[in-house]
Image (cartoon, rainbow, N blue to C red):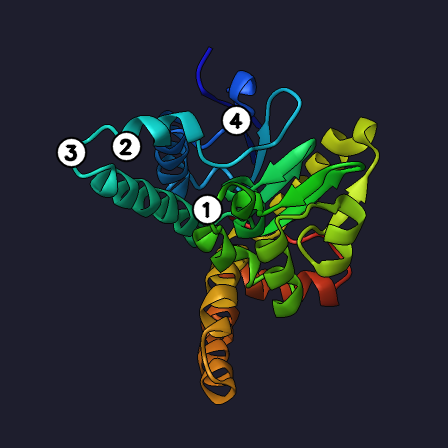
């Protein structure tokens, strides 16, 4: 069995982290597999949405602490390995948000440390009731500084700081209240609810979602006036698409659009 399994349903790609015995930890092997699959998806125009899940009893428990401990055996005490590890992890996280397709985390069990970072990095998330989220590295003396980047861009600052400094977990319903996940559903409905959300997204004009996702993240980093100028240009480009013209005409004429993509 591969450490990362993929199967496609129509225009939706489903990636399942498959290391349940290690709670789908972001080991060197898992990071490499995720990076390779996301890189492949970037140019796959047949896929319009991606679901990311974990096998077994948890979504993802963060970095592989046993591998990290082994890395300390190097002459430099692991400094070069740790720098490379966190760089590779950051690259994978940034790839998720740079993909043209929306990525939806399907979360159950626990999502801790870099696993919580992965949920926060995905464009949307659906969680099963009872799922717990935490950036709990501080409990073992390691502040979750890189997970903090994604977390603090998802939930209010003071609440993110509380999670980071106390190491305490929050339940799925609280995560939804804070904006870390989009919705919480019964465990028995998790797969169908996530698939339904993905299919809704995949049913939209792919070119419009692609240009919109890129603009969504770019404008967040801009001052207000620059954001409006930039997104105005994006909308002009979008309006000139053949399929956007067709979509507007179909709406006016009360018929289904005849999209080419």
Q: Which secondary structure lies at badge 1?
A: loop
Q: Earlier in the sequence, mark 2 or mark 4?
A: 4
Q: Which residue is labeled 3 in the image?
A: 75
User: Dot 2 corresponds to which residue?
Assistant: 72
Q: Residue furthest left?
A: 75
236 relative position to 67: left or right: right
Q: Secondary structure at mark 3?
A: loop
Residue 18 in view (yes/no):
no
Q: CA distance from mark 2 to mark 1?
A: 15 Å
Callout 1: few (<14), some (14-19), or many (20+) C-alpha neighbours within 10 Å? few
Mark drawn on residue 24 = 4
What is the C-alpha distance between the residues marked 4 and 1? Answer: 20 Å
Contact between labelled residues 1 and 3, with CB atoms less than 8 Å apart: no
Choose top left, top right, bottom left or bottom right for residue 65: top left
Residue in the image at 61% along x and 41% along y: 105
Instruction: Give how far apart the Cα atoms at labels 3 and 1 are.
Output: 21 Å
Q: Residue shown at 28%/32% (left/top)?
A: 72
Q: Residue at x 56, y 62 (%)?
A: 152
Instruction: Name the front one of labels 2 and 4.
Output: 2
Counting from the top left corner in percent of width and height, residue 45 is at 44, 41
Is 25 located above or below residue 163 in the figure? above
Count of all numbered marks drawn on residues in the image: 4
Q: Nearer the viewer, mark 4 or mark 1?
A: 1
Which residue in the protein does label 1 denote? 142
Marks 2 and 3 sit apart, C-alpha to C-alpha, by 8 Å
Which percent across, then down, holds residue 108?
69, 33
4 or 180: nearer the eye?
Answer: 180
């Amino acid at each position: 069995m591969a450490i990362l399994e993929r199967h496609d349903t129509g225009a939706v790609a489903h990636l399942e982290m498959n290391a349940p015995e290690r709670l789908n930890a972001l080991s060197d092997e898992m990071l490499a597999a995720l990076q390779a699959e996301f890189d492949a998806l970037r140019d796959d125009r047949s896929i319009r949405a991606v679901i990311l899940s974990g096998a077994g009893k948890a979504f993802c428990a963060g970095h592989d602490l046993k591998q990290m401990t082994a890395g300390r055996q190097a002459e430099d005490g692991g400094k070069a390995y740790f720098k490379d590890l966190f760089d590779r992890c950051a690259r994978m996280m940034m790839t998720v948000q740079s993909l043209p397709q929306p990525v939806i985390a399907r979360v159950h069990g626990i999502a801790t440390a870099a696993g919580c970072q992965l949920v926060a990095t995905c464009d949307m998330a659906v969680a099963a009731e009872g799922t717990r989220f935490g950036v709990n590295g501080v409990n073992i003396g390691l502040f979750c500084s890189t997970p903090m980047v994604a977390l603090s861009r998802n939930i209010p600052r003071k609440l993110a700081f509380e999670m980071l400094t106390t190491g305490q977990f929050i339940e799925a319903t609280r995560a939804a209240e804070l904006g870390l996940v989009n919705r919480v559903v019964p465990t028995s409905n998790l797969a169908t609810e996530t698939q339904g959300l993905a299919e809704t997204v995949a049913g939209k004009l792919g070119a419009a979602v692609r240009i919109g996702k890129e603009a969504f993240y770019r404008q967040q980093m801009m001052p207000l006036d620059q954001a409006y100028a930039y997104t105005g240009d994006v909308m002009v480009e979008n309006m000139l698409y053949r399929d956007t013209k067709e979509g507007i005409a179909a709406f006016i004429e009360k018929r289904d659009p005849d999209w080419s993509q």
